[in-house]
Image (cartoon, grey):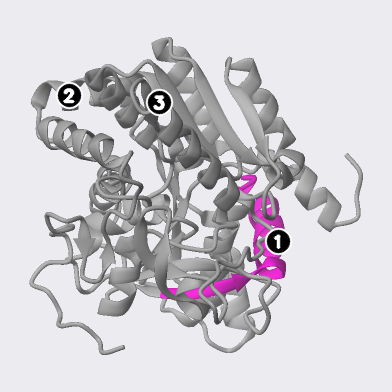
Amino acid sequence: MDKPATPNSFRTGPDEQGMFGIFGGRFVAETLMPLILDLERHWNEVKNDPDFRAELTDLSTHYAGRPSKLYFAEGLTRHLREVSSAKGRGGGAKVYFKREDLNHTGSHKINNCLGQILLAKRMGKKRIIAETGAGQHGVASATVAARFGYPCVVYMGATDVARQSPNVFRMKLLGAEVRPVTAGHGTLKDAMNEALRDWVTNVEDTYYLIGTAAGPHPYPELVRDFQSVIGTEARAQILEREGRLPDTIIACVGGGSNAIGLFHPFLDDRQVRIIGIEAGGRGLDGIEHCASMNAGAPGVLHGNRTYLLQNADGQIMDGHSISAGLDYPGVGPEHSWLRDSGRVEYVPILDDEALEAFKLTTRVEGIIPALESAHAIAHAVKIVPDMDKDQIVIVNLSGRGDKDVHTVADMLGMEI
């Protein structure tokens, strides 16, 4: 595929049809099209509405706990500088964590859920449905539904229900109904399929609170805009702390909401290197990974055209990741566009590398990261020793790892 021409700005967003170049769009059943158009109309009304923004800012500040902290990871920086010195390089950049794990509910997901629950309220909806993989979006959806008095149904793959049991219990405590999905491999793709079926069946009163920057337009745009608070804060915080922009920013990419939230405010800062980390699973030679942009091809899934894992017949493959939140065979369409434009690099990290980064961060920083976030940290571990001491790296620590302790214990052959 030819590389597209470099745009004047990478922050212009989708066109009127919801396309980022050849990616995005609205590929949905006719039953859903009136709802999608109604959602787009309401979104266009509220996105620049000062009253809507004021209410969201108030909730983000006093309920979710924003701004999240930009933390100098002194222990990890020191460790990586020792690695650099031992290899005769003598460098090692400063590493900062954007601490989305400190938000209410423990991840970046609350940013988007607060925005969308206010949108659902504006639209007069009476019921919330959501999909979840690692459970963090399910918990955040159940949280905002409880806060605003909505019944909530969360679809979750049966495989993820088993490996993310603490989050399943949290959702139930919050009053949500968790519906395990046994189709396919019982992971995020299958949960999203069932949520879309529910939406088609209950079109009048139901709001589908999508958790990632994928799906039919306007979801990729509105999720990105709600999550861009991450990058907006990080940009201002690093300017205050260091007096300049970072050299590199890194975030993990499943569907891609935490990553696009960090990346978007930096996209036109051409001197900032931007790296998205895909789940390399057990390696890209086989099918046990979720690196759709490194080993996939464009296709249509869940209402949008994007890079997907698919076989020669165009059938979607299930893939694999140690991390439930990255266990998705596609990616948000804006990431696909940024990949083809060359503005953002997307690289895979293997399960074993993420596990080592999880253990290292816990040991040297006293922070237990989500396995999703550990993928981003793992890439920082690879590149920081080769960087200069006066360089700066920001890693988005998208969530905390409490939910992953059972998975990690199993991987380490330990009992809790």
Q: Nearer the viewer, residue 395 or 50?
A: 50
Residues at marks 3 and 1, CA–CA distance in whole angstroms: 28 Å
Residue 370 tag number: none
Say left or right for 351 vs 278: right
User: Residue at point 31% right, 88% down?
Assistant: 1
User: Residue at point 43% right, 61% down?
Assistant: 331
Question: What is the three-letter code of the residue carrying label 2?
Answer: Phe
Disc 2: which residue: 52
Residue 355 tag number: 1
Outermost residue to the front: 30
Q: Earlier in the sequence, mark 1 or mark 2?
A: 2
Say left or right for 1 vs 104: left
Residue 64 tag number: 3
Q: Nearer the viewer, residue 141 or 92?
A: 141
- Crowding at label 3, few (<14), some or many (≥20) Cα neighbours within 10 Å? many
SS for callout 3: helix
Nearer to us of marks 1 and 2 is: 2
Q: Earlier in the sequence, mark 3 or mark 2?
A: 2
Question: What is the three-letter code of the residue carrying label 1?
Answer: Leu
Work out which quarter of the rendered image holds the C terminus and state it.
Answer: top right
SS for callout 1: helix
SS for callout 2: helix
In this picture, which residue range is highlighted in magenta?
346-370
Residues at marks 3 and 2, CA–CA distance in whole angstroms: 16 Å
Asked if residue 355 is among those painted magenta in the image, a careful observer would answer: yes
Q: Is residue 270 above or below residue 229?
A: below
